[in-house]
Amino acid sequence: MLPLGGDKFHEECGVFGVYAPGQDVGRLTYMGLFALQHRGQESAGIAVTDGRSIALEKGVGLVSEVFSAEKLMGLEGNLAIGHVRYATAGSRDINNAQPLATVSRRGSLALAHNGNLTNAESLREELSERGYLFQTSSDTEVIASLVAQAEARDVKSALISALEQVRGAYALVVLTPDRLLGVRDPNGIRPLCLGRLGTGYVLASESCALDTVGAEFIRDIEPGELVSIGAEGVQSVRFASQDKAVCIFEFIYFARPDSKIEGVGIHESRRRAGRRLAQEHPAQADLVIAVPDSGTSAALGYAEAVGIPFGEGLIKNRYVGRTFIQPGQQLRELGVHLKLNPIRDALEGKSVVMVDDSIVRGTTSSRIVRLLKSSGAREVHVRVSSPPIVSPCYYGIHMPTYGELIGARCSVEETRKRIGADSLGYLSLEGLVQAVGLPEEPYCLACFTGEYLHGRRQVAKGAVCHA
Amino acid sequence: MLPLGGDKFHEECGVFGVYAPGQDVGRLTYMGLFALQHRGQESAGIAVTDGRSIALEKGVGLVSEVFSAEKLMGLEGNLAIGHVRYATAGSRDINNAQPLATVSRRGSLALAHNGNLTNAESLREELSERGYLFQTSSDTEVIASLVAQAEARDVKSALISALEQVRGAYALVVLTPDRLLGVRDPNGIRPLCLGRLGTGYVLASESCALDTVGAEFIRDIEPGELVSIGAEGVQSVRFASQDKAVCIFEFIYFARPDSKIEGVGIHESRRRAGRRLAQEHPAQADLVIAVPDSGTSAALGYAEAVGIPFGEGLIKNRYVGRTFIQPGQQLRELGVHLKLNPIRDALEGKSVVMVDDSIVRGTTSSRIVRLLKSSGAREVHVRVSSPPIVSPCYYGIHMPTYGELIGARCSVEETRKRIGADSLGYLSLEGLVQAVGLPEEPYCLACFTGEYLHGRRQVAKGAVCHA
Amino acid sequence: MLPLGGDKFHEECGVFGVYAPGQDVGRLTYMGLFALQHRGQESAGIAVTDGRSIALEKGVGLVSEVFSAEKLMGLEGNLAIGHVRYATAGSRDINNAQPLATVSRRGSLALAHNGNLTNAESLREELSERGYLFQTSSDTEVIASLVAQAEARDVKSALISALEQVRGAYALVVLTPDRLLGVRDPNGIRPLCLGRLGTGYVLASESCALDTVGAEFIRDIEPGELVSIGAEGVQSVRFASQDKAVCIFEFIYFARPDSKIEGVGIHESRRRAGRRLAQEHPAQADLVIAVPDSGTSAALGYAEAVGIPFGEGLIKNRYVGRTFIQPGQQLRELGVHLKLNPIRDALEGKSVVMVDDSIVRGTTSSRIVRLLKSSGAREVHVRVSSPPIVSPCYYGIHMPTYGELIGARCSVEETRKRIGADSLGYLSLEGLVQAVGLPEEPYCLACFTGEYLHGRRQVAKGAVCHA
Amino acid sequence: MLPLGGDKFHEECGVFGVYAPGQDVGRLTYMGLFALQHRGQESAGIAVTDGRSIALEKGVGLVSEVFSAEKLMGLEGNLAIGHVRYATAGSRDINNAQPLATVSRRGSLALAHNGNLTNAESLREELSERGYLFQTSSDTEVIASLVAQAEARDVKSALISALEQVRGAYALVVLTPDRLLGVRDPNGIRPLCLGRLGTGYVLASESCALDTVGAEFIRDIEPGELVSIGAEGVQSVRFASQDKAVCIFEFIYFARPDSKIEGVGIHESRRRAGRRLAQEHPAQADLVIAVPDSGTSAALGYAEAVGIPFGEGLIKNRYVGRTFIQPGQQLRELGVHLKLNPIRDALEGKSVVMVDDSIVRGTTSSRIVRLLKSSGAREVHVRVSSPPIVSPCYYGIHMPTYGELIGARCSVEETRKRIGADSLGYLSLEGLVQAVGLPEEPYCLACFTGEYLHGRRQVAKGAVCHA
């Protein structure tokens, strides 16, 4: 059985920071991380400073599991940063939990990072050659090392100097004893936004975390921008200037529907994608259903556009969690299924459109189609509100290799057969781009095109769609 | 802040039983309880027998918290029963966790019970007078005592003799070293259904638990019926004959949408209620939204009927759990809200119909209306897919007193003002009854009418709708 | 590997009670149980009353594991009782943890019990025949049932009536909403003493628990005496009058050396036994060592009497606990040993007297002799400060069957060979009785003689000392 | 109330390493750490390698709390190192738990360290100046950084190069993918010994850990020696040559009585100190008792020498642990005492010699003298088997400042008055040195003399013995 998120891409992290002397910044960060929990369930951490030293708590598990009331009480101060992490590898390893707290000639510093550096390995080797050591396998430690070794007068300059050496995607929050820093990579691949909380400020991967703590959205951090927040307010530096290339998967799947990224409301963007999908791949059917929960917005748009009722056809058990004991092969063969249960009455004899946001391996789609059919659905028309995925991501998303990507190996018709659908339609790239609707189309689309930033191009060679 | 379920009635329990020699009955019960987790999150327990002795594991918490793989391995046998419990009182007390395992001249016996006896106190006193003692405050112990003291040749007869003395609502599963028994009270207030699992059988509060373990639905247990399941199959006895009076709140709120009760699919029933509500209380608006998750089915029906788009306006954080640390008064005043986040873009300047399944105290409705308005909604029209609640329930639902029931104290218009809605419409009782649609209308409607079974009638006297 | 206590008899329980309005009785009971922890490590519980209701906390594990600061804060009131339990069977079962809280026509009652009823089974059957049920397998529940069914005006009379029906050993503390009761069985087999704490009173299995909470020892409860403690002070009733027969194993092994039982200081009593043992079985040796910790007092006495230096030869690892992972067969064969480590220097080439308090199965003795010899001891002379055990105990001690008792099957010489000692000497029964020194010798000696109270006599028949 | 160890110096760490391909090295390390648990109870960790990567588990708590059977199963390989740590500061911080696993141009490396570097701060600053960062406050990270930056061909040379830069005390075990290294500082202040386990080898802080895993003692590692253990056996390098200066407190208090350090059996050494103490400070008394457990060996020696019986006068509760809830001020004033209970009978009217191994602050001595007197002791003569402590330690022992050391502020007579003893005698430094008995007296005695290694001399100035 697949892990919780099932057959999806996985965002690796969510970050949060708050500068608010006089407020309970530890608890605010806890609340903020809780709003970002969908971006990472493997570990959570909070670093807080009272101006003198940095206190750090982190652990393996959900935010609610890692922090007790007692631990939160130990996290008092003026500013704080926090992190939730999705483990790329299977291991639930405390060593890679963030924030990372370091002491160097730059003073005390804690960092939390969402993203992935594409030159981390070569930087690591270079630093190793110069006698550096590493205690984790995280990119954050590479950045911290570059900050420590930078010849610069202050943390901000050192951080900029460090960032000039790294390539890839990052949204970074950094805490010093008196300042909160936030950075977004030169292409702005990973999101980061700024909000106002009374006389203080908040940084977060998504605006839903601002809402949760009662902060007012100000703006997204710009690609290549560093903001430095202290007693005097927010200072901004543009340390790099490249084309904006926001990860389009934030709009498709990662972000929470109630977040806004680059001014685009996620729910509405997905609904538009559903409408456009209906135009490109209409279906004659009795019912439109969503694969819960991420397909719902697009399914609503699809249903509206084709004028077929939207309905609930699959109920998701909300209590499936990390510690749940799986049924085991024997029971699964008996028909035990825990996560999704079909509503037979709603499906019996019906022709159903099943809307999902994306297909990665195709395994979950195949299982759900089978479930719908065995629950009486006459026809199942699968509609996907994004194009086939043909290439892996190198910018901070945990994803399968070429061999595992059904879109890299199989044609649409082959995929249809593999998942057992009566018809299959993917939203076109053009359609997706228009649905999201940012002017000048500043997206990273590498997973759909194989054309990576900075000119690399890579596609699967000789991939075969075997049964 | 209200507990997880917020301002809702609370079902007290879910029960499950399985007779399946050769199968992993402990794990099947675990899966079944997991499907019934929405009926009770306070404690969970499983009793299993190998024909000689009864092994029992129970504890405070969710099913996934109470049982480890190790504990499940200790629960091997031929038949098992399980229970999830919603604490009526605030206390999370291991003493009241079920099943209850007893030894008496009837042999070893374990019982698990959903419901509430209306004469439990007098039976307790009577038994006490005769020298009995009680170790819990559960009705289950009263039934077990009556079984023990019954003059009867076997467990079945003793159980029937016991049940002839109790009044109220119950769905009961009982395990003996070689048989699984299931009983529903003479009015069939609480649900219980029977399924087939290979050559074995399953009993469950709701059919979704049958689906989850791969069992095939056979039928509901009849009011006043006792089934006894053993090596020779299912035997049935009708020990009482009264009018059927199924709790209508199962259809409104308790049961999972993918369950069927008395042949009625819950999702479809709620959708019909939404349609009917639209006829009774149409609204001119831009958007229909549901109070997640329980209002969704009715909201879909409402939107269909009035021809206004259904949309997502409120996002529920799926990670709020029992162990979550609440934000505290200070942070709440700052605007911190954890459970529901509005999608501002979807609401801005819109006239919104907000569909909920019921209003108990009115506190949550009031909070959500305020949240919607502060997120830009121009108008909020509240529609409720059941009538005002005017009387408490005595049949196994945890519910407030008269003084707390807004429907018992305030007129619809007063309620509208209290919750800050621009309009408020409740589904009529007639409309509800027709939407559920069982022939001959065999419902317990006491909470909406004050007319209890067996002729009692009780309404609030002199209740005042104070601000 | 044997459990913590190794090859010893196991006391089943320790009880504690405190009546001290205005004091933190929950915490005092916690401290008291902690002092009695050596009498039972499997489960612990505290019941407390504020005069209205009884609050109960119990769980599996050590006192420090079962109770958190938070739980203790929920245990406020005027009087409290507590219990620590040694599991007779292997199972660590929450169901049998005590105190047992019950409600009956006698009102609310909590009971905690140390001992064992010899007619529990027949009473259980009798009560079952009359329609009673049982939820545990503890004798305490039998007593509680008899109290509930007794025709009596008050709890005290009901308790006396109940006790008149039971046979066996018990030290019992009972809590009602306003009184603390304490009882010792007609022979006084199990100990119970009374102390003064300011204006309040304390009952405890051993006087070391009085010391720990700062209470002043008043006296032992008499055999067949019931004390009832309330606002007016201590009332005493003698409900039975039989010959005193205190369990002599309290003096040999169970009680803590710093306790006094029947006026006899345990440490001094054991030291006298060691001196007497030296007279009966002197040894020519270089060094006297104890099997830690229970053999220390006797070893000191032995060393004094023979004029050979007492020394440390075996170091016990204090960190071995219930959750420790055992080394496994493979590692044990490699020579891994966790619990005891010999001091090679102290043993090398020496003739050693090894003093233990008792030998039950002989397995541990055999292992220790081997360990001493492999550490260089030239000769090992085993001296035991009690006679061979020839019969099991039926009065509340967990002990092996005849077949497992090496003293029931093997002669002293056979035993010596089996454990590999160069010589073996047991203290005579007469010597033991004189060492303890109570006037009129009011002991239960059944395990050494097979002559049980009330005339039963039972010895192993045809037992063989096989290798 | 003082922490577990009470008023004692605290050793900071214990280290263990095993090279034994084919054996269960993870579990062997677990057993070894368990034997060394007395050297540190705050955190524990194990690193293991299978030749490719290093697996690491560490956590806060006792060895038995940090490691579950499941975690141990994940620690398979050919060689392993482990560490137990006593927190110097109050914080129980996972960040400072060891081993420390690093990756650098030296490859993968894990280090575990017992001791304290006297130039750690300046090395840290120097490394910081060169752009290094630190993630912990441990000296181990300083050593690891020096290893990483050393210009050397291999790990061994790099380690030696690193050690040439550090000053202070260390016993270090290092794990690489194929070798186990062990080092002792040039003065051999902290102990480390080597044993044989089948065809493999073991390194441990104390020989009792060798005994526990069934390894055979070979020899102590020499001061300034590095051993490198691999497939070909043990290679030795002497990287520094200075005067041996073994910490004498290992003999007085730190080491387990069953260990041997520098060929000296700890128990016998303490016994000799007790005998010598008797010659220097005889007493006319009825009874010699020990402050358990560390004073026992010396008390036995004292008793032998003066011909007064050794007895038990104080019983230590073995169940006091880290999670125990303290009685609070109110209960303590009531006389509640948990850890030590006097045996009143043994003390009543007696003149008692109370032997302790050392006095640091004097607070515990004072409390125990009071306890003995209130239990009836007529006179209490305190004898201490080491000299007054006049200076703090800088070599890896957690200890108070000058102001807290009673020996640095008060004369013997002043100290006697402060602790309420009838007489007080400390063993002379000469007596101690002779009792330990190593030829050429190669000890670090700084805490007794203020004369530190390398010529520093430091004593308290103007210290006053205030009440």
Image (tube, coloured by chain):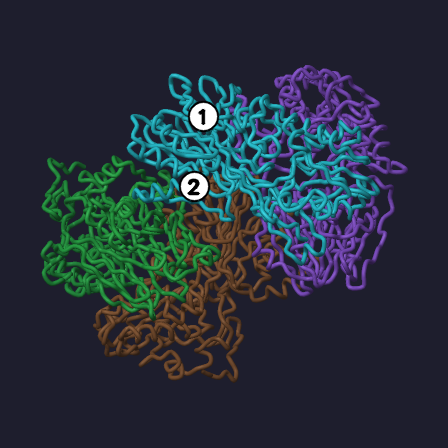
Chain colours: A purple, B cyan, C green, D brown
Mark 2 Cα-neighbour bin, 10 Å: few <14, some 14–19, many ≥20: some
Q: Where residue A343 sits: x, y (%)?
A: 63, 24
**Which residue occupies the foreground of this view, D241 or D228?**
D228
Q: Which residue is more in the foreground, C440 or A161?
A: C440
- Give the label, 2 or 1, closer to the camera: 1
Q: Residue at x 72, y 27 (%)?
A: A356
Residue wearing tag 1: B224
Looking at numbered disc 1 in the image, what kind of residue is underneath it?
Answer: Gly
Q: Give the class, few, some or many, for how many residues have Cα within 10 Å of label 1's Cα (few <14, many ≥20).
A: many
In the rendered image, the vertical position of residue A34 relative to residue B49, given as above or below: below
Image-based side of A41 in relation to C327, left or right: right
Residue D343 location (% of width, % of height): 27, 67
Reading the image, the residue beneath label 2 is: B138
Kindly identify the residue that appears in the image at 42 percent across and 19 percent down: B234
Look at label 2 and name its amino acid.
Ser
The numbered mark 1 sits on a residue in which chain? B
Q: Secondary structure at mark 1?
A: loop
Picture coordinates of residue B75, whole percent (x, y): 41, 32
State the image coordinates of residue D207 (x, y, percent, origin top left). 38, 55
Q: Earlier in the sequence, mark 2 or mark 1?
A: 2
Of residues D3 and A297, which is closer to you in this image?
A: A297
Instruction: Find residue B171 and name its label.
Output: none
Q: Give the vertical position of B423 relative to B242 (above or below).
A: below
